[in-house]
Amino acid sequence: MKRILPILLALAAITTMLSVSCAAKELTADKADFIMSNGAEPTIDPSLLNDVASTNVGLGLFEGLMQYDPVTNKGVPAMAESYTVSPDGLTVTFKLRKAQWSDGKPVTAGDFVYGLERILDPKTAADYAYMPGMVIKGAEAFTAGTGKFEDVGVKAIDNQTLQYTLSNAAPYFIDMTAHNAFWPIPKWAVEKSGNDWTKPANIVTNGPYTLKEWKAQEYVFLVKNNKYWDAKNVKLRGIKILASDNDSTNYNMFKNGEVDWMHGIANSMIDEIKLRADYQASAQVATYYYEFNTQKKPTDNVKVRQALAAAVDKQTLVDKVTKGGQIPTDAMVPPMAGYSPQPGGGYNVENAKKLLAEAGFPDGKGFPQLTIVYNTNEGHKAIAEYIQQQWKTNLGINVVLKNMEFKTLIDLRSKQHDFTIARAGWVGDYLDPNTMLDLWITGAGNNDVQYANPAYDKLIKDAAMGSGAERMGMLQQAEAMLLTDQAIMPIYHYSNQDLIDTKKWIGWSATPLGFHPFKYISKK
């Protein structure tokens, strides 16, 4: 009996370890530690991310040289252990930490070089290709098809050393590398699986999580990546991210305890939501606006665009419709340190009528029926209905509303440019006015309105080479020009609006850019 007991105990211990191991391997979406309501179906390929919902997922799966600080959203070292900048600001060298991909391969400087080549390659047709093109030597020419990648200012000195040569000193470049436009890409995974490389069975990630399950239009399920360099500090084992666009449904799930974090809120229930202790609201470096297609009639006429913008009372919109602490604005850039947003045209019905008459449509006579397109969402619908009524009352013109799935809207705006008026929003990618203005450079990937003004382009590029007050002055001139040309109609600066119980969850803070990397979140 004395010999049998230790054997039985050993067998029991082995059985327990196997059970624990199997349980970890069999973690399923219905047993997720944390559930987030994300608002839309995401894109997962880092080279193709271009919206907040996709970035939320991407921040769990991938990691760049820098990561967004969970409180300030400034860049903090991630894949980069350290960096140095040359005295002239044109050469930035990163030393990579020892890190692995989820398949065990080392993360190398070459993976960052490949990631940059892929997003800049014209064949990728990445909306964000313009961002590295703004700062990295030779990048813009390669994307335009007039240069070679060999001439782009990026070099793997060795496996752990990555060097960028900039076309101009960019004070925001270090923070910029937290953005997906600079993330590394596993070349071997892309070459093996092609466009299917981001499917759960094929994906290779370097972030705190990897993708275990993806049910289109329902959810993605992320599980902890034990190969991640900082895995010991990642507390959540599994995260389920829902793709529902229905704010009311999402809110009811939150109230019922079925969702831990609701990103965005139901405007129709804002009065109730604002009374909740778990309602989180703060100013955000982001702008909600309408896009006017400058290449389609009648919005190809600047006076029509100016008339439409001047006929909307934005203060009443945020007071009576959105009611979530948004700041009505005629500016594209929110207030930032050292920068004064430009005023724009303002709300002026008489001027709006005068402009419309000068455009050939007195009292709205002969004005064609236009369509406002927006992605399906109760809040966007309410805003569109308000603007529809404003234009009817103040200008005597009729517009119809058309809602569509978010990805369809993105394709319509960015790829096809097949719209006249479209709802849009932009969250800054880093804390600098340039992040709100470089969108409108001629031919830029996110320039949905096809705005083209050489004088504007020059100001943005000259500002990139400037510094201090002189640089800010050039950016202010550019914003004033954009608003005079009225390629867009800014409506309000967002407030971050989320529902999460910060007494239950730590590592989540209201941030200026609205980024909340999952690696920092844990249960109290």
Image (cartoon, rainbow, N blue to C red):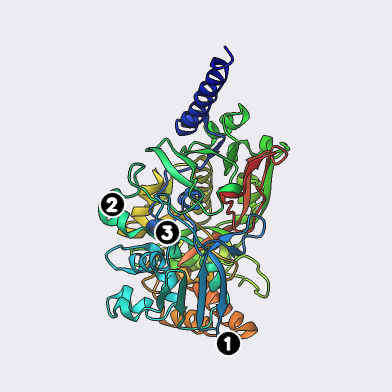
Label 2: how many residues lie within 10 Å, few (<14), some (14-19) or many (20+)?
few
For residue 87, the mark is 1
Q: Measuring from the top left, give residue 49's x and y in whole percent.
A: 42, 56
Residue at mark 3 to residue at mark 1: CA–CA distance: 31 Å
Mark 2, residue position: 195
For residue 231, the mark is none
Badge 1 element = loop
Residue 104 vs 477, above or below: the answer is: above
Q: Measuring from the top left, give residue 383's x and y in whole percent.
A: 53, 47
Badge 2 element = helix
For residue 106, the mark is 3
Badge 3 element = loop
Amino acid beneath label 2: Asn
Amino acid beneath label 3: Pro
State the residue at coordinates (31%, 68%). 121
Residue at mark 3 to residue at mark 2: CA–CA distance: 23 Å
Residue 299 visible within the image: no
State the residue at coordinates (73%, 39%). 503
Q: Earlier in the sequence, mark 3 or mark 2?
A: 3
Q: Quadrant of the C terminus?
A: top right
Residue 75 vs 479, above or below: the answer is: above
Q: Measuring from the top left, give residue 366's x and y in whole percent.
A: 36, 58
Residue sitting at the far bottom: 88
